[in-house]
Amino acid sequence: MSIVVASPAALADAVGQSATSDWFEITQERISAFADATDDWQWIHLDADRAAAGPFGSTIAHGYLTLSLLPRLASGLLEVTGVSMVVNYGLDKVRFLQPVPAGSRVRAVTEIASVEAASQGYRANLRTTVELEGSERPALIAETIGLFIPA
């Protein structure tokens, strides 16, 4: 279920609300494509045989791959009426808490942590936890900022 807000000005009334995405599989193909896009070909991401004997027991997703999936994972979790656009304003904190093995599934839990008025609209600080299916410990926690610009 998503968080539905009637206007950018009403975002402050939604502080503390959260929503959870569907599970999303992190395939080896996606990990390999990310390696190609970023020129990060470290063996823990690509060499299945070596990774099987390594510290994680299999290939793992790049931390930045998991972070880059936040827009995909959080898509539709926050619906705000009356916005002309939402701009990624930045990040305040990111922590990679555990590896994401190839073939595992993740999902996002996003909470509106705070909202403040800005000259262009409203800045919403969103606390997003990327959960790893079957694990009590999250893969990633990020505090992102979205700038909601009224229509």
Image (cartoon, rainbow, N blue to C red):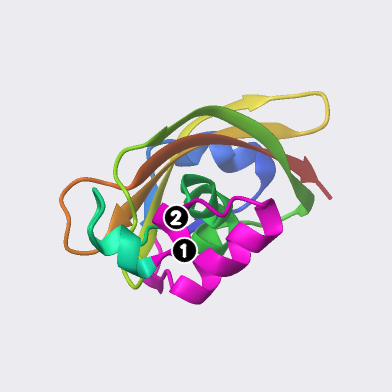
Q: Secondary structure at mark 2?
A: helix
Q: Nearer the viewer, residue 71 or 67?
A: 67
Q: Position of residue 67 (x, y in %)?
A: 52, 48
Q: Which residues fall within the magenta stretch?
A: 20-47
| Badge 1: residue crowd in 10 Å (few <14, some 14–19, many ≥20) | many
Residue type at mark 2 is Trp
- Contact between marks 2 and 1 (CB within 8 A): the answer is yes
Residue in view at x 41 percent, y 71 percent:
24
Disc number for residue 43: 2
Residue in view at x 66 percent, y 48 percent:
7
- In reply to whether residue 113 is colored magenta, the answer given is no
Q: Nearer the viewer, residue 109 or 35?
A: 35
Residue in view at x 61 percent, y 53 percent:
6
- In reply to whether residue 29 is colored magenta, the answer given is yes
Q: Position of residue 133 (x, y in %)?
A: 24, 64
Residue in view at x 45 percent, y 55 percent:
43
Task: Check the picture and name the quadrant holding the N terminus.
Answer: bottom left
Say if 117 sits above or below 134 in the image: above
Residue occupied by mark 1:
46
Residue type at mark 1 is Leu
